Amino acid sequence: MAAISGAKLTIKRDTSRNTADVKVTCKVHFTGLELCLMKLCAKSPWFKLKCQLWGADSGLTGSDDFLYAFAPYYFPDGTPSATESRSFDVTVGESLLDEDLGKDEVYGRLILTNLFNRIDTRKNTNQVTGHF
């Protein structure tokens, strides 16, 4: 089954413009069988990788806040390989990341869906803390 590793979130703030450059990176690992199928049927999407930003909450509700969704990425690409490196980048207004009173804790969630059997593989990134 395909797996995600090395999930990492970085946020670089530009306080003069009140924006933040957000980047989520990861590696996606495919089994030999999955790679073989992607090479044989290269024009058909086999996997969809979604990336979302969430605000971690430990408040009364205990549920995390959805903040943003990147455009998804589909596999295979033009050169399928057993390990693929992917990144999602966006510049947002800092207010989008302001999900809490006081300090904000933001993390990325990666969801890899096998489009044949609909099984999801999920991986969260590290949390970035700041006053956005």
Image (cartoon, rainbow, N blue to C red):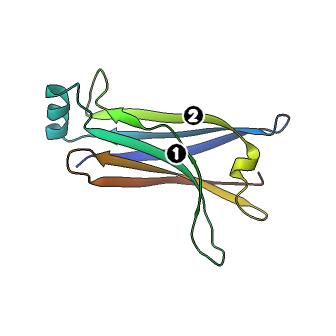
Q: Position of residue 3 (x, y in %)?
A: 31, 48
Label 2, residues with CA under 10 Å away: few <14, some 14-19, many ≥20:
some
Q: Horizontal placement of 62 versus 85: left or right?
A: right
Coordinates of residue 41 in the picture (x, y in percent): 16, 28
The residues bearing labels 1 and 2 have C-alpha atoms spaced at a distance of 12 Å
Mark 1 secondary-structure assignment: strand
Which quadrant holds residue 56?
Answer: bottom right
In front: 128, or 51? 51
Q: Eyeballing the image, is 31 above or below 111?
A: above
Q: Earlier in the sequence, mark 1 or mark 2?
A: 1
**Front residue (pair 119, 81):** 119
Task: Please state the horizontal and vertical placement of residue 27, each as a whole percent of the image.
Answer: 39, 39
Q: Looking at this view, is 45 or 80 the one in front? A: 45
Question: Which label is found at residue 8?
Answer: 1
Q: Amino acid at mark 2?
A: Asp
| Up-down relation of residue 129 to residue 25 (above or below) | below
Residue positioned 48% across, 45% down in the render: 51
- Where disc 2 sits, the SS reads strand
Residue identifier under label 2? 89
Tell me the mark number nearer the camera, choosing from 1 and 2: 2
Residue 93 spot, x, y in % from top left: 74, 41
As shown in the figure, which amino acid type bears the numbered disc 1? Lys
At x 43% / y 38%, what residue is drawn? 72
Compared with residue 109, is residue 62 higher up or lower down, i.e. above or below? below
> Mark 1 and 2 residues: CB-CB less than 8 Å, in contact?
no
Residue drawn 40% across and 33% down? 85
Q: Residue at x 43, y 44 (%)?
A: 50
Neighbours of disc 1 within 10 Å: few (<14), some (14-19), many (20+): many
